[in-house]
Image (tube, rainbow, N blue to C red):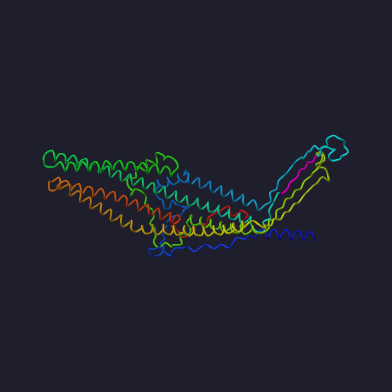
């Protein structure tokens, strides 16, 4: 009968230890529209890559090499990785409280006593009290009847998962930043080459105008205007030289190490943005719920889950706590008899603690946990709204940047014809140099505008890839998480 009662009690305690007071979790409704602002057809069957296989989107070999180096050396990514490792260890710490800690002990206690104080018969000399013990025991193990420890363990696990997803978000950002930095370098290099050509033409034009002034067919005003145009090109040459070097510095910071000479040589061959392998076309009709797979949104939801778990831990604080301290081993006043038969000793000290008066502390902690959950709900909703806006902005630029680039390239062609005609009329003595100068500046401005627009169009595609969570494939592989195998 006693054995059955003991077994029943142990089974009931084990059953209760699996219970928690965590509220039922419900994902907040996304506070965004069910479709993007621009109406479009169904999703096209285009492979847009994924976060796990970014090479299907970033197809340029030089860019792939830079991204691989960045993923191995970027310090921000390393910081995120170490934060994940720390969160994993913290979860193990919290989870370990679910199990008793077994300690081995060995000790001795020797006291010198005065026999007269204790009225002992040994005389007036000193008396030595000795106690030796060897054993093992459990100290202050809390039986998790109400799920306080389990709730704290789940909260720690959810925060670990949030940090892991945060690392994925950081990885996605690093990939996009490296791509943008390389595009910036190529764009500045292209602008530098264009400026060098313009500078050479303006030097030639300056010499020509000066010669016409020397022979009396030109004016000093024409010379001054030609010189001003020449100095403007020289100024721009230094600006784009500086910006190109700064773009390289930014790229090396993102990559995390100085670029190999071979990589620099490959980049030098990219004289224009057209030399970069283009990104795959973005299909129309992307569903708005695709942003739900973004790592930052998933991370925000895991933090919300952790806040929900904290409420369960706060609720459990109102109920009694049962702690058990127990030990088993041998004890003797003579070390030579410590391991002899009959020297066994044990003790069990259960303790129940019931909160009676705490001046409202536990109630305040519960209110705090609920308020933090509401805070995380608002933060999660804000993350979803921000993601929706990023994708909507990128989709809005998808078509407009392409049309703008076509118009800008047409402007370059028209400006080139205008300049050639104006230069021919100036050389023929039909028009003043001012008309040639205006046409030359119009062409140069159109060329720089085309470079800027092309950079914006390519950067917008990178932004869209990042905003969609790493591509636009509708099916993604399940996320692997070894921590889910831990006891919760």
Q: Quadrant of the N terminus?
A: bottom right
- Outermost top residue: 125
Quadrant assignment, res 396:
bottom left
Q: Position of residue 289 (x, y in %)?
A: 46, 62
Q: Main secondary structure of the magenta part?
A: strand
Determine whether 63 is above or below 377 in the image: above
**Rendered residue at 62%/61% (across/down):** 21
The residue nearer to you, when weighing 44 against 172, is: 172
Q: Is residue 457 found left or right of 335 in the rendered image?
A: left
**Rendered residue at 30%/45% (across/down):** 191
The residue nearer to you, when weighing 300 against 129, is: 129
- Outermost left residue: 216
- Outermost right residue: 121
Q: Position of residue 130 (x, y in %)?
A: 80, 39
What stretch of residues is rendered in magenta?
130-138
Q: Is residue 318 magenta?
A: no
The residue nearer to you, when weighing 46 against 471, is: 471
Q: Position of residue 161 (x, y in %)?
A: 54, 53
**Rendered residue at 24%/49% (across/down):** 443
Quadrant assignment, res 364:
bottom right
């Amino acid at each position: 009968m006693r054995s059955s009662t003991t077994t029943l009690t142990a089974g009931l305690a084990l059953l209760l230890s699996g219970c928690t007071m965590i509220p039922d979790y419900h994902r907040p409704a996304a506070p965004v529209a069910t479709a993007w602002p621009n109406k479009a057809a169904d999703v096209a069957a285009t492979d847009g890559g994924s976060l796990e296989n970014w090479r299907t989107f970033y197809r340029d070999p030089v860019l792939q090499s830079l991204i691989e180096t960045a993923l191995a050396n970027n310090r921000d990514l390393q910081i995120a990785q170490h934060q994940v490792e720390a969160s994993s260890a913290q979860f193990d710490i919290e989870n370990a409280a679910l199990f008793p800690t077994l300690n081995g002990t060995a000790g001795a206690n020797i006291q010198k006593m005065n026999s007269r104080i204790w009225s002992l018969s040994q005389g007036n000399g000193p008396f030595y009290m000795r106690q030796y013990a060897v054993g093992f025991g459990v100290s202050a193990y809390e039986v998790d009847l109400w799920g306080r420890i389990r709730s704290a363990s789940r909260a720690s696990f959810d925060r670990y998962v949030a940090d892991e997803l945060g690392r994925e978000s950081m990885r996605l950002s690093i990939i996009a930043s490296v791509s943008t930095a390389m595009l910036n370098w190529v764009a500045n290099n292209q602008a530098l080459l264009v400026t060098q050509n313009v500078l050479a033409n303006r030097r030639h034009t300056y010499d020509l105008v000066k010669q016409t002034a020397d022979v009396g067919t030109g004016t000093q005003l024409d010379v001054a205007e030609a010189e001003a145009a020449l100095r403007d090109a020289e100024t721009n040459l230094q600006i784009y030289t500086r910006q190109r070097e700064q773009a390289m510095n930014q790229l090396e910071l993102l990559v995390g190490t100085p670029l190999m000479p071979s990589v620099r040589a490959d980049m030098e061959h990219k004289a224009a943005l057209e030399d970069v392998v283009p990104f795959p076309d973005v299909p129309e009709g992307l569903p708005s719920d695709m942003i739900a797979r973004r790592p930052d949104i998933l991370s925000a939801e895991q933090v919300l889950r952790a806040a929900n778990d904290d409420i369960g831990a706060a609720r459990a604080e109102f109920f009694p706590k049962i702690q058990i301290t127990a030990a088993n081993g041998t004890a003797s006043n003579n070390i030579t008899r410590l391991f002899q038969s009959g020297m066994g000793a044990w003790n069990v000290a259960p303790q129940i603690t019931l909160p009676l008066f705490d001046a409202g502390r536990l109630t305040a902690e519960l209110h705090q946990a609920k308020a933090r959950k509401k805070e995380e709900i608002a933060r999660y909703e804000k993350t979803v709204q921000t993601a929706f806006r990023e994708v909507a902005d990128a989709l809005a630029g998808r078509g407009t940047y392409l049309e703008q680039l076509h118009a800008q390239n047409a402007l370059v062609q028209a400006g080139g014809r205008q300049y050639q005609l104006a230069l021919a009329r100036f050389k023929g003595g039909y028009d003043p140099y001012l008309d040639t100068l205006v046409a030359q500046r119009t062409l140069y401005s159109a060329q720089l505008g085309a470079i800027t627009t092309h950079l914006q169009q390519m950067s917008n595609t990178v932004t869209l890839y990042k905003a969609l969570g790493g591509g636009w494939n509708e099916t993604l592989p399940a996320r692997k998480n070894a921590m889910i195998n831990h006891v919760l």
